[in-house]
C-alpha cells in the first residue's frame, strides 16, 4: 500500500509539473477542447497571442477564433472532423484576436483518446505573421531579382545544372547569342563554343575549374545561333546549398567585340607611333652621318681626277685610282640609301607614268633575277600617274625585287602588280596607286617582321647585303607621301605593297634660253676647306677660274666686285644665311648670274624653287660638267 501511494504521488507530481510547463509557454497558444470543440483549459501563450483571459474563453466554442466567413463555411467543424478521422489536423490561416485584429496562425489539432474513446482535442496555435511577412518580402525580392535578371540585355545571365545543361535564360542571352528560351533551355552550354574548342574539351574544363577554384573567368571566341563569332567575357560561379552540395552554375557572358576591336586599334596605333618615333630617331642619326660622310667622299672624289692626271699611263697607278673611285661611288650609293630612309634626300619629284617606269627597268630586273626566278608583271589598264623622283622609284623597285630573289634560294616567281586603289582607313584618305611585289620564298619570321625596314638590319650572310635596301624603299615611299606595308607567311612567301598618292601628268616646261658660258669665273661658296679644294680642282679641270669664299656674307661682297660669271654654293653653311638664302639674295641683286646649289642633304633643299638647280654630293667630274652645261644653256 505504501508503495502504491508513493507511485500515485509521483504521477500527480509529474502531471502538476507538465501543467506548469504548458501553462508557462508563451510562444504557443495551447488549449484543450472537449469532443464538441468547447475550450476546457487555456495557457499563458493563448492569452498573449489571442488576448483572452482564461475565464473569458473556457466553456466557449473554439470557433470564436475564426473569421466570420470561415465559421459560415464550417471550417471549425471540418478541422475537428479531420483530426478525429486522421488523428491530426494541420493548417495555416487567418484567426481573430479578442480586439478583432487578424493574425496568421499555424494551427495543429490532435485528437486525444483514452481507452479507445475520444475525450477531446489538444490545439496548439502559433502566430506566424512576422515569419510570413519575411517570407513575402523574400518572395517579392526574388520576384524583383528575376525581373532584373530577365530585363538585362547587355549580359547573358543564366543558370546551368551540375552537368552544364541550361536551366533558365534571360533577354540578354537572346540578344547576344540569338537563342530564345524555348530553343536553349535543356541544351548543353557547350553549343556556344566553336567546334575546335568543343573537341578540345574546353566547356568541361571551364566547369571543372569553376568547381576547383570557386570561380572561372576568361575571354575568348563564342558562337551565336547564326554561326557568327563574337569575342566574349565569361564568368562562371558554382552555386552550392548550405550543406556545400553543388546545385549548378551561374554563368555571365558579355559581348566585348567592340571593346576588343578598340583595344586592338589602340595597340596598333601605339605600335605605329613607336615605330614612327624609332624611324624618326634613326633618320636623324643616319641623316647626320650621311651628310658628314658625303663631304668626306666629296674630298676623295674631287682628288681622284687629279690623281688620274698625275698617274698618266701608269697601269698600276690607274688600277689603284679606279679602285678608289669605285669604292667612293659605292659609298655614295650607301649614303643615298641612308638619306632616302631618313627622308632627307634631295629629290626631283615629277609626274610619271608607272607603266613606262616599270617596263623601262624590266630588262635590268630580268638580268638581276637570274634564270631560276621568273618575273611576272601585271599592270592594270588606266593606272593613275604618281608624283615621285624617277630614279628613287627605280631604285626602290630594284631593291624590292632583289630582296624577293634572295628570299628564294631554290628559285620561284616574283610578281609585280600595279593597280588603282582608294584608301580611307582613318589615317589616310584618297586615291592611290598600289605597287605590289610578291614572292614565293621562305617568308619572314614574325619576330623580325618589325625590323625589316631598319637600316643595316639584314638576315643575309656577311658580304651579301647592306641592310639598306628595304630602308630605301621605306624612305622613298614616305618621302613621296605614301606608305609601304609588308605581309608574310612562313613557307609561302612575302608581299610588299607600296601605296603612292595619285598625281597628275603635266606638260614638260619649255627650256628657257640662257646664255652659254664656255669659260669664266666661278664663285665657289663652301665652308669646308677640304671640300672646297676638291670642288675647285674639278672646276679648274673644266676650264673655269675659281674664287673661293666660306660664307654667304663674303659671297655677296665678292659679287659686288663684279667679274663673277657663275655661283656654285653649298646649301648647308654656318651663319645667319645658308646657301638657299644666298641664292635668293643673288637672284634679287644679280638676276643675270646663274646659280648652282650643292648638298649632301638638306631639309632646306625641299623648299628650293624649281628654277634653282641642285647637284648632289659627292659628284664626279662629268656630273658637274653636265650640271653646269644645263645651267648655262
Image: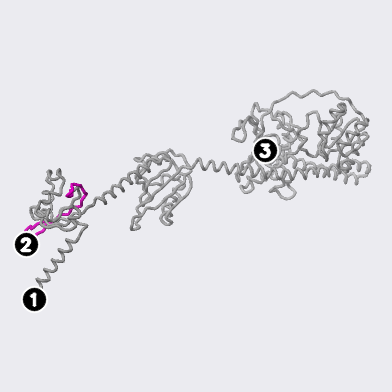
- Quarter placement of the C terminus: top right
Q: Are marks 1 and 3 in contact (CB under 8 Å)?
A: no
Looking at the picture, how far across and down is residue 435, in whole percent?
66, 34
- Quarter placement of the N terminus: bottom left
Which residue position is annotated with label 1?
3
Is residue 366 rendered to the left or right of residue 201?
A: right
First reached walking from the N terminus: tag 2 or tag 1: 1
The residue shown at (86%, 31%) is 628
First reached walking from the N terminus: tag 3 or tag 2: 2
Which residue position is annotated with label 2?
115
Query: Marks 1 and 3, Cα distance to the nearest angstrom?
Result: 128 Å
Above or below residue 172? Residue 355 is above
Above or below residue 14? Residue 516 is above
User: Magenta residues, as a range?
Assistant: 96-121
Residue 108 magenta: yes
Above or below residue 450? Residue 597 is above
Amino acid at each position: 500500500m505504501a508503495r502504491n501511494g508513493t507511485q500515485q504521488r509521483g504521477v500527480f507530481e509529474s502531471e502538476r509539473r507538465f501543467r506548469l510547463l504548458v501553462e508557462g509557454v508563451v510562444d504557443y497558444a495551447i488549449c484543450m477542447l472537449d469532443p464538441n470543440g468547447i475550450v476546457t483549459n487555456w495557457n499563458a501563450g493563448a492569452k498573449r497571442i489571442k488576448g483572452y483571459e482564461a475565464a473569458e474563453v473556457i466553456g466557449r466554442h473554439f470557433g470564436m477564433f475564426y473569421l466570420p466567413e470561415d465559421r459560415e463555411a464550417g471550417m471549425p467543424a471540418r478541422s475537428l472532423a479531420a483530426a478525429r478521422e486522421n488523428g491530426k489536423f494541420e493548417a495555416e490561416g487567418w484567426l481573430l484576436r479578442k480586439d478583432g485584429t487578424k493574425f496568421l496562425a499555424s494551427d495543429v489539432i490532435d485528437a486525444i483518446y483514452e481507452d479507445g474513446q475520444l475525450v477531446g482535442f489538444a490545439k496548439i496555435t502559433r502566430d506566424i505573421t512576422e515569419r510570413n511577412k519575411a517570407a513575402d518580402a523574400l518572395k517579392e525580392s526574388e520576384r524583383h531579382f528575376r525581373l532584373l535578371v530577365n530585363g538585362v540585355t547587355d549580359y547573358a545571365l543564366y543558370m546551368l545544372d551540375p552537368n552544364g545543361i541550361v536551366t533558365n535564360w534571360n533577354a540578354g542571352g537572346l540578344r547576344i547569342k540569338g537563342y530564345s528560351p524555348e530553343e536553349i533551355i535543356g541544351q548543353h552550354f557547350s553549343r556556344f563554343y566553336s567546334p575546335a574548342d568543343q573537341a578540345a574539351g574546353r566547356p568541361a574544363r571551364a566547369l571543372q575549374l569553376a568547381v576547383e577554384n570557386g570561380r572561372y573567368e576568361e575571354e575568348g571566341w563564342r558562337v551565336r545561333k547564326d554561326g557568327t563569332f563574337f569575342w566574349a567575357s565569361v564568368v562562371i560561379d558554382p552555386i552550392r546549398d548550405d550543406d556545400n552540395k553543388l546545385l549548378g552554375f551561374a554563368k555571365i557572358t558579355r559581348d566585348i567585340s567592340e571593346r576588343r576591336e578598340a583595344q586592338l586599334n589602340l595597340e596598333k596605333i601605339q605600335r605605329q607611333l613607336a615605330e614612327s618615333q624609332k624611324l624618326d630617331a634613326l633618320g636623324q642619326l643616319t641623316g647626320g652621318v650621311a651628310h658628314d660622310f658625303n663631304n668626306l667622299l666629296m674630298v676623295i672624289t674631287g682628288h681622284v681626277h687629279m690623281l688620274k692626271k698625275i698617274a698618266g699611263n701608269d697601269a698600276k697607278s690607274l688600277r689603284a685610282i679606279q679602285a678608289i673611285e669605285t669604292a667612293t661611288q659605292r659609298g655614295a650609293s650607301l649614303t643615298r640609301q641612308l638619306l632616302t630612309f631618313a627622308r632627307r634626300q634631295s629629290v626631283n619629284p615629277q609626274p610619271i607614268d608607272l607603266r613606262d617606269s616599270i617596263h623601262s627597268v624590266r630588262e635590268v630586273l630580268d638580268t638581276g633575277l637570274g634564270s631560276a626566278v621568273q618575273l611576272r608583271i601585271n599592270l592594270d589598264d588606266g593606272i593613275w600617274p604618281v608624283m615621285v623622283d624617277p630614279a628613287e622609284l627605280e631604285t626602290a623597285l630594284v631593291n624590292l625585287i632583289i630582296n624577293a630573289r634572295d628570299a628564294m634560294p631554290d628559285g620561284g616567281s616574283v610578281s609585280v602588280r600595279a593597280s588603282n586603289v582608294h584608301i580611307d582607313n582613318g589615317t589616310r584618305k584618297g586615291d592611290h596607286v598600289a605597287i605590289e611585289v610578291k614572292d614565293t620564298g621562305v617568308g619572314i619570321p614574325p619576330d623580325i617582321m618589325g625590323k625589316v625596314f631598319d637600316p643595316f638590319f639584314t638576315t643575309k650572310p656577311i658580304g651579301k647585303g647592306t641592310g639598306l635596301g628595304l630602308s630605301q624603299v621605306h624612305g622613298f615611299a614616305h618621302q613621296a607621301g605614301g606608305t609601304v606595308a609588308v605581309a608574310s607567311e612562313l613557307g609561302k612567301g612575302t608581299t610588299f605593297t607600296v601605296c603612292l598618292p595619285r598625281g597628275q601628268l603635266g606638260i614638260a616646261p619649255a627650256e628657257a634660253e640662257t646664255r652659254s658660258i664656255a669659260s669664266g669665273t666661278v664663285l665657289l661658296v663652301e665652308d669646308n676647306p677640304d671640300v672646297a679644294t676638291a670642288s675647285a680642282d674639278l672646276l679648274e679641270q673644266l676650264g673655269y677660274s675659281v674664287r673661293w669664299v666660306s660664307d654667304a656674307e663674303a659671297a655677296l661682297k665678292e659679287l659686288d666686285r663684279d667679274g663673277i660669271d657663275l655661283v656654285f654654293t653649298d646649301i648647308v653653311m654656318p651663319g645667319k644665311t645658308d646657301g638657299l638664302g644666298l641664292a635668293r639674295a643673288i637672284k634679287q641683286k644679280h638676276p643675270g648670274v646663274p646659280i648652282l646649289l650643292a648638298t649632301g642633304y638638306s631639309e632646306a633643299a625641299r623648299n628650293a624653287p624649281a628654277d634653282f638647280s641642285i647637284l648632289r654630293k659627292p659628284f664626279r667630274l662629268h656630273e658637274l660638267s653636265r650640271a653646269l652645261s644645263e645651267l648655262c644653256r
